[in-house]
Amino acid sequence: MLTNFIIAVRAVVPIFLLILAGMGAGRLSILTEQELSHVNKAIFQVMFPVMMFYNVYSADFSGVIMPGYIAFCLIMLLVVYGVGLLTAFLTEKRSDSRGALVQAVYRGNFVLMGIPIMRNLMGEEAMGLTAVMVAIVVPCYNVLAVITLEAFRGGKLKPTKLAGRILTNPLIFGAAAGILAAALGVRLPETIESPVSQIASAASVTALMVMGASFRFGSIRENRKNLVIGVAGKLIVSPGLALGAGYALGLRGLPLALLIIMFGAPCAVSGYTMAQQMDSNADLAAGCLIFTSLFSCATICGWIFLFKQLGAF
């Protein structure tokens, strides 16, 4: 258990160091508010679409394919999304905060936490299914995020206009291009694949530093209620629903353990940039990312301990 806690800490420490580096740059006024806005726009329109493409394009789909399990995970993702949506409507009146809150509850940093913790918990044999689920679930996270943030932008929005905004969203383009490349077996030349990989790797790093430079500590007090809801929803309610349903349906071993990271990982790094670029409550998104990352080390280990005691894996 201590080993898993140390691995979780090691996974989130880089997040805080990058945020702190960004905060330092912000306090030194290295970047103006206008420049930060421009960088965020570049991350949203260029770096994240490339990252989405590369995550799907580079995924190894030769791992274990379990259609029933994949269907269960996608259904539970929609259930958790629905719970987040209902909670946002019941507890928050502002549309921009509703969008950020819903995103915080269901959308996790599966890539960052999933691979190292699953490798330690279940061994190398877990990597095949983990990689497959990352390639399937992460694009679904992003599609739901685009739909949610567009729907909560405010004002009256016709279905045709909403559909148009979704289809022209840069992240949707990136995911679609990755799916098409994977389906057709397209392989990029090394001279192209290398810079694509570098841009994909730099996307989260850049986003975290920009978030740190933009973060206002006063926003914690302003969003206190929603931060509590978002953190509890992401780290307790979301994994609790998925793990409870999975255990009741007889899931054991690797498939059950994978749900801990799939649904209990901290908020996704890209959530802040998307919120900022799509007129949502970026301060709330940033706060949820910071606090879920902080507390996830304890909650993930708690879920692992509980289900190990139950003999589930």
Image (cartoon, rainbow, N blue to C red):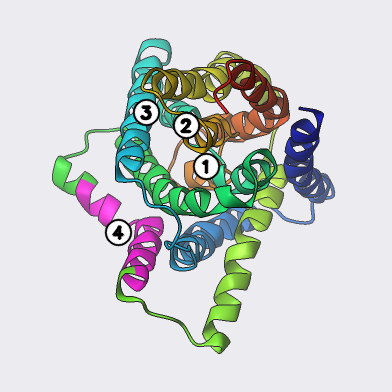
Residue 265's x, y, as percent? 58, 34
Sequence-wise, the earlier of marks 4 and 2 is 2
Q: Quadrant of residue 113?
A: top right
Quarter that holds the N terminus: top right
The residue that disc 3 covers is 81
Q: Residues within 10 Å of mark 3 (few under 14, many from 20)?
A: many
How many tags in the picture?
Answer: 4
> Start and end of the magenta stretch?
163-182
Residue drawn where x is 72% and y is 43% of the image: 212
Residue 107's x, y, as percent? 48, 36
The residue that disc 4 covers is 168
Q: Amino acid at mark 4?
A: Thr
Q: Residues within 10 Å of mark 2 (few under 14, many from 20)?
A: many
**Tag 3 near tag 1, CB within 8 Å:** no
Between 31 and 257, the residue placed more toward the observer is 257
User: Considering the numbered disc 3 on the image, is that residue within a helix, a strand or a loop?
Assistant: helix
Q: Residues within 10 Å of mark 1 (few under 14, many from 20)?
A: many
Residue 163's x, y, as percent? 21, 48
Residue drawn where x is 49% and y is 31% of the image: 256
**Tag 4 near tag 3, CB within 8 Å:** no
Q: Is residue 131 magenta?
A: no
**Tag 1 near tag 4, CB within 8 Å:** no
Sequence-wise, the earlier of marks 3 and 1 is 3
The residue that disc 2 covers is 100
Q: Which mark is residue 7?
A: none
Sequence-wise, the earlier of marks 2 and 1 is 2
Q: Residues within 10 Å of mark 4 (few under 14, many from 20)?
A: few
The residue that disc 1 covers is 271
* CA–CA distance in space, label 1 to label 4: 18 Å
Query: Does residue 309 show up?
Result: yes
Secondary structure of the magenta portion, mostly? helix
